Image (cartoon, rainbow, N blue to C red):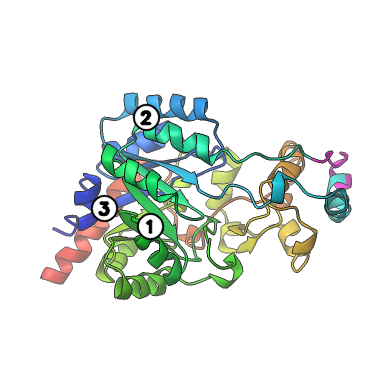
Amino acid sequence: MWYQTKASKILDIRYPILQGPFGGNLSSVELVATVSNLGGLGGYGAYNLNPEEIIAIDKQIKLATNKPYNMNLWVSDSDALGGSVSDEQFNRAQQLFKPYFEELGIAPPEKPAPFKSRFENQVEVILHQRPPVFSFMFGAPEADILEQCRKLGIVTIGAATTLDEAITLEAAGADMIIASGFEAGGHRPSFLASAESSTIGTFVLLQLIKEKIKTPVIAAGGIANGKGVAAALALGADAAQIGTAFLATEESNATAIHKQMLFSDAAKYTTLTRAFTGRLGRGISSRIAHDLIHQENGFLPFPLQTQFMSHLRKTAIEQEKWDMILFWGGQIAPVLKYTKAADLMKSILEETTAYFDHLKS
């Protein structure tokens, strides 16, 4: 059967379908449990949570499902040297974004406190809680962390946006590698070269990686239905990861307006921008992203830009100025049909099965 792949065996799941783990409080225990209980692999994005919060979420997931699930962290969670920026750099950002704050009738925020990396403490929690799967982005953890995962029976998955990154992750000892195409919504998890120079489409990247490495590969980006899953498997993927389609379901923790936008005509237009977080990410095109093309040198590094823009985002939501907000989403959003995760999962499985049955006949 099509679903009996290396990935489904390694992950101990029935179907090689992964739900993308969303950061920024967009993940939910309900969505993770729904996907895992239906035979896929639910995923929770925990990079913005402190250790105590990760423990609490992990316990909730274990109560909601007895099936495998994935906890996701960011290896590199800051681009700010020493966790901060100079006053001059911060003032430049204030001036660049001042017109938008003025339009909303609020003052730009004060300079944020220096950011301290959380990854080391977060990984300790992962090793303690022992989720069945630990996935990571923006690099590879130290060798001893991956070795401890292996000893504890935690399956590890790294994300690559280029062939070089996939080769690096294989050398580091990741059990599986995500081929993250530039069609995908959310942040580009590039870590060897700039994200702007690492924009390869999913199916090209998948084939490049399959030529050079032996580690099982998961295709991600531009996949939202069974046809996409079947295409990925036909090109050699061992599994497919689906993000935007699950983000749009009732079970995700995205806001109602975010889900509405993913099903609207606006979802036909997405853009890659650093304007909202300081790291390159894809979402539905917005006025701010359009206005500030080629002005990246005025943005703060991640995650200071996220903190800076959170004030603007909160007020823009209150005033319903949707064109001033970045709603994360991938290029595939216009084909979305399902608002319930179970219906989406059922459709994916039926479509994929129908495709492979057709090949046999």
Determine the residue positioned at 82% across, 41% down: 111
Residue 218 among those drawn in magenta: no
Query: Do tag 1 and tag 2 residues touch (Cβ < 8 Å)?
Result: no
Determine whether, in the image, residue 292 is placed left or right of residue 68: right
Q: In this picture, is 211 found above or below 90? A: below
**On the image, numbered disc 1 is attached to which residue?**
172
**On the image, numbered disc 3 is attached to which residue?**
16
**Secondary structure category for the residue under label 3:** loop
Image quadrant occupied by the N terminus: bottom left
Q: Earlier in the sequence, mark 1 or mark 2?
A: 2
Determine the residue positioned at 38% across, 24% down: 59
Q: In this picture, is 162 found above or below 285? A: below
State the CA–CA distance, disc 1 to disc 3: 23 Å
The part of the chain drawn in magenta is: 102-111
Q: Earlier in the sequence, mark 1 or mark 3?
A: 3
Query: Do tag 1 and tag 3 residues touch (Cβ < 8 Å)?
Result: no
Which one is in front, 29 or 325? 29
Query: Do tag 2 and tag 3 residues touch (Cβ < 8 Å)?
Result: no
Residue 183's label in the rendered image is none
Kind of residue indicated by mark 1: Ala
Which one is in front, 235 or 262? 235
**On the image, numbered disc 2 is attached to which residue?**
129
Kind of residue indicated by mark 2: Gln
